[in-house]
Image (cartoon, helix red, strand yellow):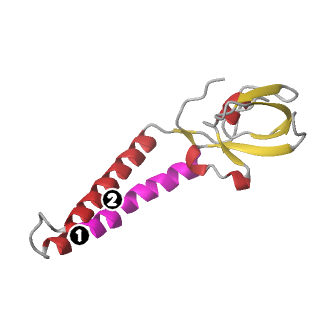
Amino acid sequence: MTEPENLISKNTYDRLVAEVEDLEGRGRSDIAAQIKTAREWGDLKENAEYHAAKDAQGMLERKITLLRERIDNAAIVEGSGHDGRIGFGSKVKVRDETSGQEQEYELVSSPDQDLSQGKLSYESPVAQALSGNGEGDTAEVRLPNGTTRRFAILSIA
């Protein structure tokens, strides 16, 4: 099952919008103040503080651009809505067939990934292999290191 590449929850969307607003407001003001202060120190050719501030300004603008693109191209999704199939927003319990270890994951957007909380990016190889499968199915995952793992799908919520 192929998912669009920029699925995010409403909470993540709101958080990204707030971050852009902060960067465009406070972030730009802070950088402008740094540039102004550095300019006052004299010759710009040999002014390391000025060049560092200009570099920081470039990085800030790049971050704003990337976040804006993510926001503009976002598909907001709440819940899984996949009728018994794994997809974005699904909570899934799986068993690694090699180790026998059971794990629970929630498939989330990349910015929300936190493996310590069981939040797995839906873009990850494991999530992509699980997507579209149902309870009782087995998914085979080729990991970035070249190994293959098989997961039995125990439950989906």
| Side (left or right) of 35 relative to 105 | left
**Magenta residues, start to end:** 9-33
Tag 2–tag 1 contact (CB < 8 Å): no
Of tags 2 and 1, which is closer to the observer?
1
Residue type, label 1: Glu
Which quarter of the rendering shows the C terminus?
top right
As measured in the structure, the alpha-carbon distance from the residue carrying label 2 to the one carrying label 1 is 22 Å
Q: Is residue 151 above or below residue 50?
A: above
Q: Is residue 50 above or below residue 67?
A: below
Q: Is residue 113 above or below residue 126?
A: below
- Location of residue 70 by image quarter: top left
Q: Residue 131, how many percent across, how many down?
A: 70, 29
- For the residue carrying disc 1, how many other residues have a C-alpha within 10 Å: few (<14), some (14-19), or many (20+)? some
- Location of residue 42 by image quarter: bottom left
Q: Which mark is residue 147?
A: none
Between residue 10 and residue 133, name the one nearer to us.
Answer: 133
Residue to which mark 2 is pinned: 24
Give the secondary structure at mark 2: helix
Q: Which mark is residue 49?
A: 1
Outermost residue, left side: 43
Which quarter of the rendering shows the N terminus?
top right
- The residue drawn where x is 56% and y is 49% is 111
| Side (left or right) of 93 relative to 56 | right
Between residue 151 and residue 83, name the one nearer to us.
Answer: 151
